[in-house]
Image (cartoon, rainbow, N blue to C red):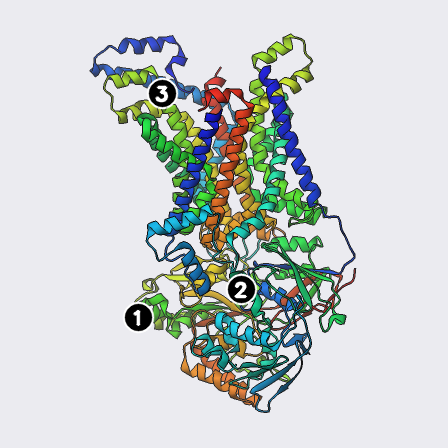
Amino acid sequence: MAKYILNRLLVAILTMFVLTTATFFLLRLVPGDPFAGPKVIPEIKERLRIHYGLDKPLAEQYLIYMGNILRGDFGYSLAKRGHRVNEVIKDAFPQSLDLGIRAMITSIIFGIFFGIIAALNRGKPLDYLTVVLVLIGISVPSFVVAALLQYFFGVYLKILPVARYDTFWHTLMPSFALSLGTMAVLARYMRASMLEVMTADYIKTARAKGLRNTQIVIHHQIRNALFPILTILGPAIAMVLTGSFIIESIFAIPGLGRHYVLAMQNLDYTLVMGLTLFFGFFLIVMNLLVDFMYGIIDPRVRYTRK
Amino acid sequence: MYVIPENKGGGNIIKHKQQLFTPLDHSEKIESVLETETIAFWSDVWRRFRNNKPALIGIIIIFIFVIFAIIGPLMVPYQYDKVDLFSTYKNPSGVHWFGTDALGRDIWCRVWTGARVSLFIAIVSALSQMVIGIIVGSISGLSGGKIDMIIMRFVDILIAIPFLIWVSLFMLVMGPGILSIILAFSLTQWKGMARLVRGETLRLKETEFAIAAKSMGASTWRLIRKHIFPNVLPVVIVSTTFQVTNAIFGEAFLSYIGLGIQPPMTSWGKLVASGIAEMRSFPFMLFIPAIFISLTMLSLQLIGDGLRDATDPKLRQ
Amino acid sequence: MMKGLYIKNNLFKIVFGLLLIALVFTIAMTSVAQTEEKVFTIPTNGGLDNLDPRVLLSTAHAVVQYAIFESLVRTHDGELLPGMAETWEISDDGMTYTFHLRDAKWSDGKPVTAGDFVHAFVRMFEICPASSIFDDIKNGAQLRAGEVTPEELGVKAPDEKTVVITLKNPVPYFMGLIGLHLGSPGREDLAIKFGDGYGATAESLASCGPFILTEWKHEDKVVMEKNPDYWNADKIKLDKVVVYILPAEQTQRNMFDNGEIDYYIPRSEAEAVEYEAEGKLVRYVRGGIRDLHINKHGQNDPVKAKILGNPNFMKAISYAIDRQGYIDNVLQGNGLPATVQTPPVTGIYPGKTWGEVSTNYGKYHPETADLARSKAYMDKVLEDMGYSSVDQLPEFDFLTSMDPEDPKDVAAYLLSVFTDIGLKINVVYATGKQYYNNLYKPALAYDFARAGWGPDYDDPHTYMGYWTSSSMDMGVTFENPEFDALLDKANKETDLVKRAQILNQAEALFSDIAPCIPIMHFKGALAVQPWVKGLTTAISGLAIDYIYSDIVK
């Protein structure tokens, strides 16, 4: 187990290292001087030059840059005058985390629920209905769903606030819109996983022992079918994260995703770089946690995974 | 898991084993045996795929869309970028089948021009990431050792960051445009394919027919082309189908935030994005492109599912 | 079976834990308090980056800056009110303005002094490109160019309570200019204390206006509360003003319909008519111009420069633009065709508007397209260049900050005009700040740019001043010595009728050969919630003035 954890940890650190190096050179690839432009006030530009040591040799610049990152200092935003990238992240992360957690929970609960319903009614209308719902969830772009939700609940029914992220009622539409894609994927996996479990030997044994059907479904099938779902938690987190780019922009939520989209539109290289690294580190840590969780829950991992 | 001769009954194995000891110039025979195997496999897949009605409908829809993408803009006497200020915001009618937008441009024409762009981007980038994935994956799988480790670590790193972030970074550096979207997709999206192909290659490398071929002096390239490629093809096709959907969504995302296709060229993503702005007053401007995007995504999903079921040996009965 | 049990315990712990987190978040995020405060809620499009009035200028910033800062005077509903200055004197030659400050405090308790104004003006000329509108202040342009020291600027504080401003020209609109938020006092101590972060957070700013900035959540909202110490606090009825930063206009409309924001600017005449039917629409007079700028330097390409610098080329494009058709059919009437830069409603001297005085309307640019004339001008260009067909012209870069696919925006229409006359165009869709980076000096990275201008004061000079050679506040300038001289002469002229004639002459010269094509003027339309009372509008500066409005629910 210790070896497994150590291994995952080493890979994670290596990944972070390569990611930071890659963004550094990507920034160097930007045509022209990324800090040029008349609206960049000279003092700010000077500060950026010092921060990244642009007059020094490339190798030294790289070391300065790595040193800054190690100290957790992402420098100043290029477009937002007077804003430090660190502060932007600090201000925006809570909203994104809150939205992400809500969306994850919504998608897990509903995705698993729909998956179970579909599997238990395999080949019956309820199964097809779920499959159709899932396919719609995968097929319709999230910004269309979000726009329709806004119109229907906000303008037509007038029961939910249209946008922003303030009270509990504000959170409902964005978390639902963000959860749809992941929900659909989870429902599919859950359905497949349930179907596999349902034909497993120990279920037959349970049946042979004369256990009641509901008992078998709840205690054996669902519980064991849930297990493989854990493996797609990592990708699901990544999916929610990128989904938040669109959802936060549409619902005017001041989260990291909205900042990322704005920074790209403004060609705010330093902010894009800082956010990319933050996203990267966050996902790597989350994946690590999922891996550990997997290791704890599944004893086989200790032996089979290296 | 997919196309293993052993699975198809003991007879073949015996054949291979017998031929292990035959001279080099007879190797063609093994291939012909393997090729008939492959043909039998594909006719089997086709038979099962044909019975999968949703997947078949998906194929038909995509086929229709591709045909219309080619001939659609030619069917009406308009051009996709021709502004006509005296027929703005026309509802769908006999004159303008899908109506006109705020600049009086014919939406039928724009939808199919957009289809050309969206489908072109999706298909080309899916195919190119497939090619890169197969090459990198098989090199990694076949060579093993240090090269394999380096490639796989690299893949790990690519996977750690969601593809939209990679694509956005690429777009920042390269600037918007069809070519940069395709490049960004194909350069960042081969990782999954490479993993799949490597896994298959590693496994196939150990199978008897590969050992047999190798022992008879087949070159690595020949091994990839004649043995590994046909065997990984089913997984590759399924995965590529899903990559097409990713590329369509990715293009729509980039167009929505303004980093995608540049006007007056259009794409489905752009049409939907401008439709959202007009949704309240002219709903058809959103619904028409949204339906096309969704139908395409749905069809590709159905085709992908159908292919996966058809090629999955576990589901073969 | 063992495996099943093992999973049960841990998995349940995880799921339970996640649910608990969700519950805590839900409770924490649910707001409880709902008071009977009078809260005015405003939508704004752009992001707010820095509220130092000397750093960035956009409508979104001005909406906040007008409320939290108080200049020497304030223009409200077309009327000049005192501001930080209780009284003032203007010298007979109109060159020296002496302002006597009232006793006022910043929100952190420090008194507002004359030194705060001197600091503000010095800082403005040092760092703000838009400071060119104040170039009639003595040594202003020289300070921006770094030719003089701050002590030589014509803004002085002889004592704590007196500000003396010396001009180089006796401009008649100076009182309107001095009321802009650009001329509000600034705090040197805070600027030093916060350095680069000055103006980027609520903490780094002190307020002195009718409202106090109390909360600023970036990319989300700005909260301002009534300033009890404001000199005119008795007349301020709102308890709180909240500015929501909402990027998508569709979202703004939806929020307005759901009663979440108090006003909404309709995007089209169709929308305006819908709100008119509901009795929520206010129509008002609004200044501003939407135009097309031509970079006559052609991005250092001599061939391009020769073509773009040719006034006939400018006219070939202008005569191909169907201003009336575009406004009637695409904007459904939400605008007015512009044939000169200055809108006809602009004031010039008491009792007269520019529309009644100017002789240039319809003379140099057409209201409807005249393709035959366009072609005639283009033929002259081709002849000058020795080309036989339009195809030989190089490809031009068209810079736009708005989505060229957004049909409501003129960029999309201009693209079709370029195509119609056979130009090859490369669209540069630069959003946000990148647009300004391309447009402004020294980059000037465009051949054509979709641009616009909002008036800072109600005088035709505001539409022409930024084209003079010394201006930093736009892309390429006119660079015509005769035009510069005319504008300077106009501002030296104290006889207002004569001044109008000089400005008319400058406008004629500009319209005839300047690298700028006027396209449309605006029609003001605003949807307002029925419970909002006393919202006023202005032709220049901050268009929608909520400072003295009220909420009656």
Answer few, some or many: residues within 10 Å of disc 3's Cα (few below 14, many 20 plus, some between 14 and 19). Answer: many
Q: Secondary structure at mark 2?
A: helix
Distance from Cα at disc 2 to Cα at disc 3: 66 Å
Q: Are marks 1 and 2 on the same chain?
A: yes
- In this view, A34 is above or below A229: below
Q: Would you say A160 lies left or right of C454 here?
A: right
Whether the residues at callouts 2 and 3 have beta carbons within 8 Å, the answer is: no
Q: Depth check: give the residue in front, B159 or B218.
A: B159
* x and y percentages locating residue C230 in the rendered image: 71, 71
Q: Depth check: give the residue in front, C192 or C304.
A: C192
Q: Nearer the viewer, mark 1 or mark 3?
A: 3
Residue at 56%, 75% in the rendered image: C343
Q: Are marks 2 and 3 on the same chain?
A: no
* Amino acid type at mark 2: Tyr
Q: Would you say A178 lies left or right of C291 here?
A: right
Q: Depth check: give the residue in front, A207 or C369.
A: A207
Q: Are marks 1 and 3 on the same chain?
A: no
The circle drawn on residue B204 is 3
Q: Would you say A286 lies left or right of A168 here?
A: left
Distance from Cα at disc 1 to Cα at disc 3: 68 Å
Quadrant where the C terminus of chain C sits is bottom right
Quadrant where the N terminus of chain C sits is top right
- In this view, B276 is above or below C125: above
Label 3 lies in what chain?
B
* x and y percentages locating residue B189 in the rendered image: 42, 37
The circle drawn on residue C385 is 1
Label 1 lies in what chain?
C
Quarter occupied by residue A15? top left
* Amino acid type at mark 3: Leu
Write down the residue under mark 2. C326
Distance from Cα at disc 1 to Cα at disc 2: 31 Å
Label 2 lies in what chain?
C
